[in-house]
Image: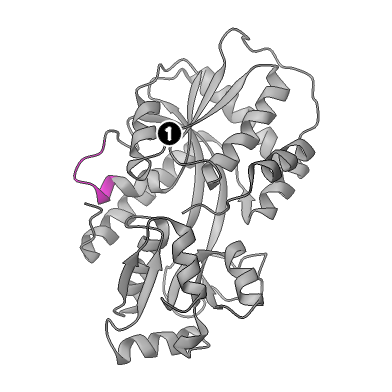
Amino acid sequence: MLPCNPSRRTLLGMLAAAVVARPALAQSPHQPVHLFVPFTAGTGPDLLARILSEELRQRWNQAVIVENKPGASGNIGTQAAARAEPDGNTLLVTVNTFVMNASLYRSIPYDPETSFVPIAEIATGVLALVVHPSLNVATFAEFVAAARAKPGAINYASPGRGTPQHLAMELLKLTAQIDLTHIPYAGSAGAVKDLAGGHVPAMFLPVHTALPLAASGDIRILAVGSEARAHQAPEVPTLAELGVAGFDVDLWYAVLAPAATPKDIVARYNAAFNEILAEPNVRTLLDRQGLVAQGGPPERLAALIAKDRARWAKVVNDAGISAE
């Protein structure tokens, strides 16, 4: 699942407001840059790709094209990016499902660490543990007690098997030692609708999606899964604060290039993306979508990929999860 689904008109309006003209930098105008997004339009990676594409176009006076290549939990578009020429004209904009898939599928058409060169982490989004009021729990402690009283009786929704929301709940099951039953949906819209309607009582949601539903009384937010409290909901405790040791899950988004892309090209993109993410108007635009701008050197993203690959491989193995 991705944190937002704005209309095309709304998205274009936000982009127009966020971008101001800047002097062009030296960049070959002969070939456009292609940003491959392995998910549908309106998803988190798509939103970020369109922000980055417009900013790069303004800076480099060069065509930057977003290409959506959805399917197979992101594997189709990711494979296409991995097979592209490593000349700097094709990049991948993706979410951390990119790493999780390596453990969920017996075989995937890329390797998260060897098929790509990391460029930069772009943004993160906080996940919140929420319940429907009909579950009659008001705190995380009460949620755990209810789950332990009737193992497997509480259902939880996710946008599909292997999504960050699914694996976050499976990690919670392992660390809190509770038994819940997974109800996978084909995307987030149906899952959120059934959650708000009380047809399924629990779920991990992006915090900016959860807040208006909580304000209307459709759900209750019990905790957030991030290391620190969400600035959008500073009153909501983290699961770590509530005694779930070492629990830290979120959505993270990144840009990568095909393996063997020259270091000078990677460095140039990294510098450009860090400049873009430092822009106050871009940070404000991301904040409205429940995202926090990140940035940093390629090495930071490489370390994140390696760490998450090992961590989610253990969760998938311990929980006996498969996407197939």
In the rendered image, residue 136, in percent from the top left (x then y), is placed at: 48, 91
Residue depicted at 22% across the width and 64% down the height:
318
Q: In this view, does 117 lie to the left or right of 3?
A: left
Image mark count: 1
Relative to 263, is 55 on the left or the right? right
Percent across and percent down for residue 47 are 59, 42
**Residue 104 lies in the magenta-colored region:** yes
Residue 248, how many percent across, how many down?
46, 63
Give me the residue at 43% from left, 33% from top. 69
In the displayed structure, 172 sits above or below 160; it is below
Q: Which colour scheme is used?
A: one colour
- The one nearer the camera, 71 or 244, is 71
Question: Which residue is rendered at x = 56% and y = 56% of the image?
Answer: 125
Q: Where is residue 11, by image quadrant?
A: top right
Residue 60 drawn above or below residue 159: above
Q: Identify the residue position indicated by label 1 in the image.
A: 69
Q: What element carries label 1?
A: loop
Instruction: Assess disc 1: are there few (<14), some (14-19) or many (≥20) residues with their C-alpha within 10 Å of its C-alpha.
Output: some
Residue numbers of the magenta segment: 102-108
Residue at 54% of width from left, 40% of height from top? 46
Q: Which residue type carries mark 1? A: Lys
Q: Can residue 239 be seen in this view?
A: no
The x, y position of residue 258, in whole percent, is: 40, 25
Front position in the image: 95 or 303: 95
Q: Is residue 59 visible?
A: yes
Q: Give the vertical position of 29 relative to 14 (above or below).
A: above
Please say whether residue 27 is one of the residues in the magenta stretch.
no
Q: Is 141 drawn above or below residue 185 in the view shown? A: below
